[in-house]
Image (spheres, helix red, strand yellow):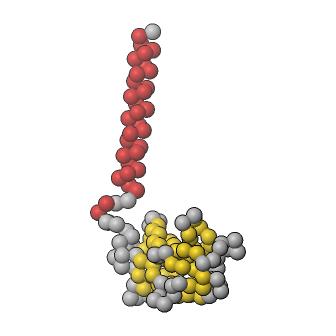
Amino acid sequence: MISFTKLNFFVTIVLLYSLINMFTEVNSVAINNKRGNFCDGFEITLPSGSTPAKNGTKITVNWKKGDSDIVKINDVELFNDKGLLNILWEGDKSFNSDGTATQTVEIAAPQDLKLPAEVLLRSWGSTANGPNCFKITPHFTLNAY
């Protein structure tokens, strides 16, 4: 009976070591700290004069790559404080040689959203190696058309 208890103890120690080692490996491989923050400088902005905006109209969204590792812009989403309202644009947009990008999107709020409403835009960018970044604009007023 004593040998069975020692065996249980040994198996428990081996399992704990395996679990701890597994999480340590994930942390060291997931994102290399020497790269710094891969989102640094990635920005989404609206052109001046586009806020407040009218529902059903088009606006131009601007991005800056900055010092980030972002290589593609994936979407523009309309949000309010309760969550996602609508995906305004989906694609695979690259930055220009000057590190900027633009996309014209139509502001399209769901019919059940009472206007005027405070909203914001969120945009996803992806790196060549897989990690994604998202950025949001400041809140702005969305008015009825």
Q: Residue at x 43, y 26 (%)?
A: 11
Q: Residue at x 40, y 79 (%)?
A: 65
Does residue 108 appear in this view? yes
Q: For residue 16, what is the image quadrant?
A: top left
Q: Is residue 22 left or right of residue 56?
A: left
The relative height of residue 125 versus residue 54 in the rendered view (above or below) is above
Q: Quadrant of the C terminus?
A: bottom right
Q: Nearer the viewer, residue 22 or 90?
A: 90
Q: Nearer the viewer, residue 99 or 44?
A: 44
Q: Nearer the viewer, residue 43 or 118?
A: 118
Q: For residue 91, what is the image quadrant?
A: bottom right
Name the spot of residue 112 as percent of width and height, x first: 69, 71
The relative height of residue 136 versus residue 56 in the rendered view (above or below) is above
Name the spot of residue 37 as percent of width and height, x first: 34, 66
Q: Residue at x 47, y 73 (%)?
A: 136
Q: For residue 111, what is the image quadrant?
A: bottom right
Q: Residue furthest left?
A: 34
The relative height of residue 12 versus residue 102 in the rendered view (above or below) is above
Q: Is residue 10 left or right of residue 36?
A: right
